[in-house]
Amino acid sequence: MAVTEQEVSFDRSELIITKTDLQGKITYANRTFMRVANYAEAALLGQDHNLIRHPSMPRGVFYGLWHALKSGDEFFGFVKNYTSDKNYYWVFANITPDRIGDDVVGFYSVRRVAPKGAVQTIEGIYQKMRELEQTTERKQAPEVSWKWMVDFVRQQHQMGYEEYIIDLYQKHRSD
Ligand SMILES: Cc1cc2nc3c(=O)[nH]c(=O)nc-3n(C[C@H](O)[C@H](O)[C@H](O)COP(=O)(O)O)c2cc1C
């Protein structure tokens, strides 16, 4: 029997926070994450962060995320995640290298609830990325769809990806 996924949400004042090691294995999760994603702490620590990956997320977004982190940069993006019971929630995420002195020892992510209007816009873009990924050779697909998005944003809005995505969040944050 097909099960319909339900959207779950959290308060605007709340932050969902996790930390990972350099490989993306979860080393810390705050209480809000555990409540929204519906996991006990013991089920999270040591797990790959793709544990909560939603299948509708384009692979290109994670290409952009890891490319930024490996270059020592931070990343902003809208992400749809699965809860443990296969419901979903949308976040606006900021992911940054976690540094001790000059060394990057892991990464952390701080997420706010994604405004509905912003999700509507980004879903259209993600849909195009997924379509492109399906018609592109598998190994190249994430990089190709990521670059398509960056070019699309540049052409449509005369802005870089990061500026566009922060602007999209700001524009809708009081929806
Ligand atoms: C600090 C940090 C937080 C992350 N948060 C998420 C997240 O909330 N959801 C998600 O799907 N991937 C997240 N990722 C990316 C995952 O590590 C992974 O690249 C992604 O789920 C795609 O999985 P795959 O590479 O196995 O296809 C995060 C990575 C880091 C470093």
Image (spheres, helix red, strand yellow):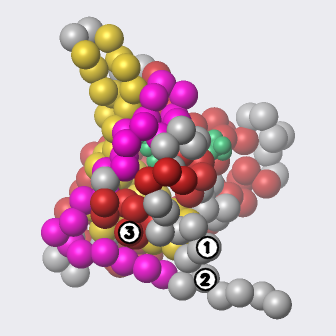
| Residue 145 appears in the rendering | no
Work out whether 160 lies above or below 73.
Answer: below
Task: Name the kind of residue labelled 1 in the image.
Answer: Lys
- State the residue position of label 2: 5
In the image, what residue occupies the spot 60% across and 52% down? 51
Label 3 beta carbon within 8 A of ligand 1: no
Q: Are marks 2 and 1 in contact (CB under 8 Å)?
A: yes
Q: Which mark is residue 35?
A: 3
Task: Name the kind of residue labelled 2 in the image.
Answer: Glu
Picture quadrant of residue 168? bottom left
Is 12 in the magenta? yes
The first of marks 1 and 3 along the sequence is 3
- Magenta: main secondary structure: loop
Disc 3 on helix, strand or loop? helix
Picture quadrant of residue 95? top left
Task: Name the kind of residue labelled 3 in the image.
Answer: Arg
In the image, what residue occupies the spot 73% across and 50% down? 133
- State the residue position of label 1: 86
Tell us which disc is closer to us: 1 or 3. 3
The first of marks 2 and 1 along the sequence is 2
Disc 3: CA contacts within 10 A as few (<14), some (14-19) or many (>=20): few
Q: Which is more toward the observer, 120 or 96?
A: 96
Q: CA distance from mark 1 to mark 3?
A: 14 Å
Is 11 in the magenta? yes
In the image, what residue occupies the spot 21% across and 72% down? 12
Report the span colored magenta.
7-29
Q: Position of residue 92 (x, y in %)?
A: 34, 58
Disc 1 on helix, strand or loop? loop
